[in-house]
Amino acid sequence: MAGDEIGARLRAVRQQRGISVRGLAQSLGVSPSLISQVETGRTQPSVSTLFAIVNELDVSLDALLADAPGGVVRAPAPAPADPQGEDGGSLPPVQHAADNPAIEMENGVRWERLAMDPLGSVDMILVTYEPGATSSVEGRLMQHAGHEFAYLLEGELTLKLNFDTHVLRAGDSLQFDSTRPHMFFNHTDAVARGVWFVVGRRDGGLPPAPVIRRGADGVSSAVDALQAFDR
């Protein structure tokens, strides 16, 4: 999916929610110009920025990636009465690779949404990190509701979780509470690829972040503070 399509859908949701560009930017601790550039397709958001935006707008990644006429995000269809039924509800039992909606991030990360959960409680994503790619262009640790699980299929990936650093290689797996600040990066010269499951991301949001005034050290949000601690 092109950046202008993603931006148009984010803008549609923001307007449906009655949130201004400035209000959204203030909630995320970013500049209004960044939000405008994302919405107009002039820049593609990093993984952390996209996660922050969809969580703030209370829209699912599935809805964002779903094919919607005119680039407008439609509300997810209601869950079937019997999601465990033989036909898997209204969703097909098999999703072919050619039909995977995908997002290409400017930071060398590619997301492919895999088969959808009829209840919308699980995001299943095939994630590819090119050499040097990182989940946050800004180098900021990200947070979002839910619990994260992943299995690395190939390559090597480094996870920064709070103040700990973990190296994952092919065959390794992980799990952690996604409200913990985290970031992934690929410091190798080979592609890293894995399957991610984010469970319960829509079950609740993060508590309000403390307000931190901008100072000489450039701190303007709680995420900036964590980054400053890392330095």
Image (cartoon, grey):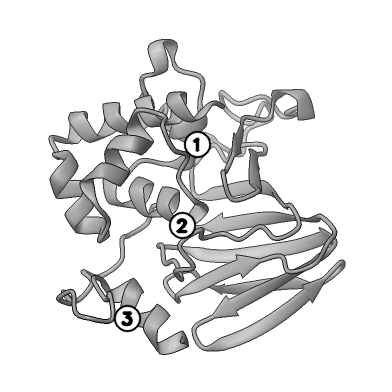
Which quarter of the figure has residue 110? top right
Direction from residue 136 to residue 129 in the image, left or right:
right
User: On the rendered image, what quadrant is the N terminus found in?
Assistant: top right
Q: Nearer the viewer, mark 3 or mark 2?
A: 3
Tally of marks: 3
Q: Is residue 68 above or below residue 137?
A: above
CA distance separating discs 3 and 2: 16 Å
Q: Which residue corresponds to mark 2?
A: 48
Image disc number at residue 225: 3
The secondary element bearing badge 2 is classed as: helix
Seen at 43% across and 11% down, the residue is 69
Q: In the rendered image of this protein, does residue 90 appear above or below residue 197? A: above
Q: Where does residue 220 sit, x and y in percent of width and height?
A: 23, 71
Q: Position of residue 22 (x, y in %)?
A: 14, 45
Say whether disc 3 or disc 1 marks the residue closer to the N-terminus: 1
Q: Residue at x 29, y 30 (%)?
A: 11
Q: Amino acid at mark 2?
A: Ser
Amino acid type at circle 1 is Asp
- Side of 176 relative to 94 (left or right): left
Residue 226 locus on image (x, y percent): 38, 81
Local packing at callout 3 (Cα closer than 10 Å; few below 14, some 14-19, many 20+) is some
Mark-to-mark CA distance, 3 and 1: 31 Å
> Label 1: which residue?
62
Q: Quick check: marks 1 and 2 in contact, CB under 8 Å?
A: no
| Residue 205 drawn at (x, y percent) | 31, 61
Q: Name the amino acid type tagged 3.
A: Ala
Furthest-top residue in this view:
69
Between 33 and 79, the one lying in front of the other is 33
First along the sequence among labels 1 and 2: 2
